[in-house]
Amino acid sequence: MKTMTDAKITYVLRQGDTPLILAQRLCGWCGHAPELEIDLALANIGLDLLGQARNFLGYAAQLAGPGYSEDRLAFGRDEREFRNLLLAEQPNGGFNDTLVRQFLLDAYHVLLHRELSHSKDSQLAAIAAKSLKEADYHLRFSRGWMIRLGDGNEISHQKIQRSLNDLWRFTAELFHADAIELELAELGIAVDPRQLQAPWQELVNSTLQQATLALPNEHAFRHGGKQGQHSEHLGLMLAEMQFLQRAYPNCNW
Amino acid sequence: MTHAEWPLYEVFIRSKQGLAHRHVGSLHAADDQMALENARDAYTRRNEGCSIWVVQSCHLVASQPEDREAFFDPSDDKIYRHPTFYTIPDGIKNM
């Protein structure tokens, strides 16, 4: 039974860490976005994701037992203990890079939450159902901008295509299932991510087509984030994100 | 490359069913759909509304300050146009 709980905690952390890390990334745009209105939109999406992360991490803390809290999980874990997708931790780059990262993940989250909202775990189902409405809107934003810039002018098209090519390799992980996920999917608790690949690909294809963008040639191959093996970017980001709680443990304001 | 400014839009929000849309501010957007989404992000984040209207500012016809006397002063001294002689029941809100 213990291992079953451990597997579930890991799974819930995976669901919470991706929005947490992505939220931190998006909030890095605050005050720097190309337009005031985009600034607000990115911060809004970031805060939605932070809310989702809090729900998942709060649930993980509850499963982990006394002594754990969402704050401790967010600010007290080391890089190797984070379970987010590699794609989420990739640097903001330019607006084109942020946008492509966002679109690929939004498309994934819409499909994931739609499935997870039928989970036999009522808490997971409730969090997913709530997150789905937000993800729908995020996708509307990022998909709209993909089409606008992809089918914009020569420069905007080139930039989006380049970001897409750069980030494509991280998309393999979205559908990579390990023993933990397969075991929990068997029980109807988790979503088997492999089943999301076909609809995701379809959504991406139709968007790229409208945006006059080409599917990258490169094979998607990177994974490991869900197991705690991250790219070099996460550590730096955590150093900033966790600084306050590390320097002044349990500080409050 | 020249930086073309996005057109200005005016935003109207209805705070709940049954009330009228009220002007809440303005924003920039490249087209109508983006204006609606920007308005959603900028003006309804704190649960302010259930419906949004946006319209390009250049499509609004506005009265001019120099017409103020002819337009508005004549109603200054017509107190019989104000329904102040009625008592409003406590239960009526939004009057």
Image: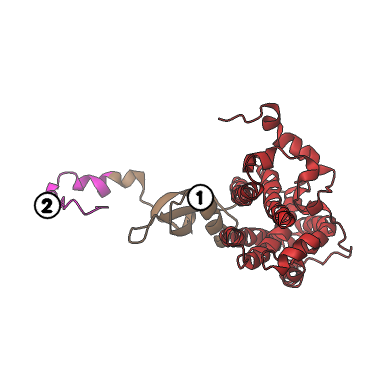
Q: Is residue B91 magenta?
A: yes
**Residue drawn at point x = 71 percent, y = 60 percent:** A146
Checking the image for residue B45, the label placed there is 1
Residue with the mark numbered 2: B86
Q: Is residue B46 magenta?
A: no
The red chain is: A
Badge 1 local density, few (<14 within 10 Å), some, or many (20+)?
Answer: few
- Indicate the amino acid at tag 2: Tyr
Q: Chain of mark 1?
A: B
| SS for callout 2 | loop
> Where residue A197 appears, x then y in whole percent?
76, 69
Q: Quadrant of the C terminus of chain A?
A: top right
Q: Nearer the viewer, mark 1 or mark 2?
A: 1
Looking at the rendering, the stretch of residues picked out in magenta corresponds to B69-95
Residue A124 as seen in the image, left or right of residue A197: left
Q: Residue placed farthest to the front in the image? A: A1
> Where residue A31 appears, x then y in whole percent?
64, 39
- Judging depth in this view, the residue of A69 and B58 nearest the camera is A69
Give a yes or no on whether discs 1 and 2 share a subunit: yes
The brown chain is: B
